[in-house]
Amino acid sequence: MRALLLENLHPQATAILEASDVAVENHGGAMDEDELIEALDGVELLGIRSKTQLTERVIAASPSLCAVGAFSIGTNQIDLAAAARRGIAAFNAPFSNTRSVVEMAIAEMVSLTRRLPVHNRLMHEGVWNKSADGAHEIRTRTLGIVGYGNIGSQLSVVAEALGMNVIFFDSAEKLALGNATRMPTLESLLQAADIVTLHVDGRAGNQGFFGRAQFEAMKPGALFLNLSRGFIVDVEALREGLESGAIGGAAIDVFPEEPKKKGDPFVSPLQNVPNVILTPHIGGSTEEAQRDIGIFVSTRLRDYVETGSTSLSVNLPNLQLALPQGAHRIAHLHDNIPGVLAAVNRELAEHDVNIEGQLLATRGDLGYVVTDVASGLTDDAVAALGAMPGTVRLRVLS
């Protein structure tokens, strides 16, 4: 089995896959559609981060591909529906870099509140300006968290431990941790927060989520952070707010358009604006987080290959599976229609194949039945299962 790993993934990812006899090819940068289609010829496993786009065109042109790992929190770079329709399992790392992002957000809040970017620039220019004007502690400041998922909720706990008042807004019902207060609307949060930080997901509906109207609704002089997705913020409107003084400072780690690889030129309207911290999408880029992500996602890919386990897959029915109980394991992904389980068992019975164990799970339009069978599984039996109406993908694991 062959794997292609892009975008400088941690060496642990390669080590885990190679330990399972997977031939791994590493590539340092991202790839565009044409490059990826060519590189995926004969490849079963793909590992990417946020720059490479696994589009429907790429998926349709890569029949050997059976699983993809997003070595990141987000999966918006993958057409999950197209992957599911072709039986390609997708996995991500929803928790592994949470702490890294939280710590960076805290560091940036302190830096902006103390106006460290301004003082740093002046010192490099040879200007000594020792002053407390505009500098504050973050203790007692009100932090407004937009998006209360894994990162937002952990940030809430850490910020409160530092003495901040925490309010949050999320479109879904979320349990408030500690003394955090849920705000009924985004507007009510913006009017109350001294610091606004975004931690929303990358779904298409969030594009342009935070624009001129939202910046104008913020408290005068409030600080703004975005460590989530670049396309959700109108950076031109943010620049205008910063230059007018309506926004007191900003820290931006993600951008609407980002270079494909290290060393490529970067241009943004936010460059050279005072009290602004710009970083190259490194919120989760600590050695600890990248190691953990490498281990977590590659382990999901390995388990899918070896056992058929789809636990924590973001697009297929989830089954947590141990090693096969019989001589063979049949992993049958199919359209979620009545009678498939009975049809699988009927075909096996007609070919004199005894079932040792069986599990079924469904998710939306897809069903996933995994069957452990004794010896005697013939090519004819496999062909009959693959020819069943509604079959999306059939894998036989020995």
Image (cartoon, grey):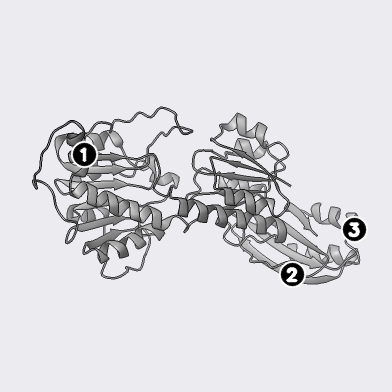
Q: Quadrant of residue 366?
A: bottom right
Residue 57 location in percent, x, y? Answer: 61, 35
Residue at image mark 1 = 120
Residue 311 location in percent, x, y? Answer: 60, 62
Which quadrant of the figure contains the C terminus?
Answer: bottom right
Front-most of residues 36 and 89: 36
Q: Hey, what amino acid is under mark 2? A: Gln
Labelled disc at residue 358? 2
**Marks 3/1: CA–CA distance:** 72 Å
Instruction: Tell me, yes or no, whether the two marked residues, 1 and 2, touch with CB atoms within 8 Å.
Output: no
Labelled disc at residue 156? none
Mark 1 or mark 2: name the one nearer the start of the chain: 1
Q: Is residue 249 visible?
A: yes
Asked whether, in this view, residue 131 is left or right of residue 24, the answer is left
Residue at 76% from the left image edge and 65% from the top image edge:
371
**Marks 2/3: CA–CA distance:** 18 Å
Q: Is 366 located above or below residue 285 in the figure?
A: below
Residue 377 location in percent, x, y? Answer: 88, 61
The nearer-to-camera label among 3 and 1 is: 1
Labelled disc at residue 378? 3
Q: Is 108 located above or below residue 6 in the figure?
A: below
Mark 3 or mark 1: name the one nearer the start of the chain: 1
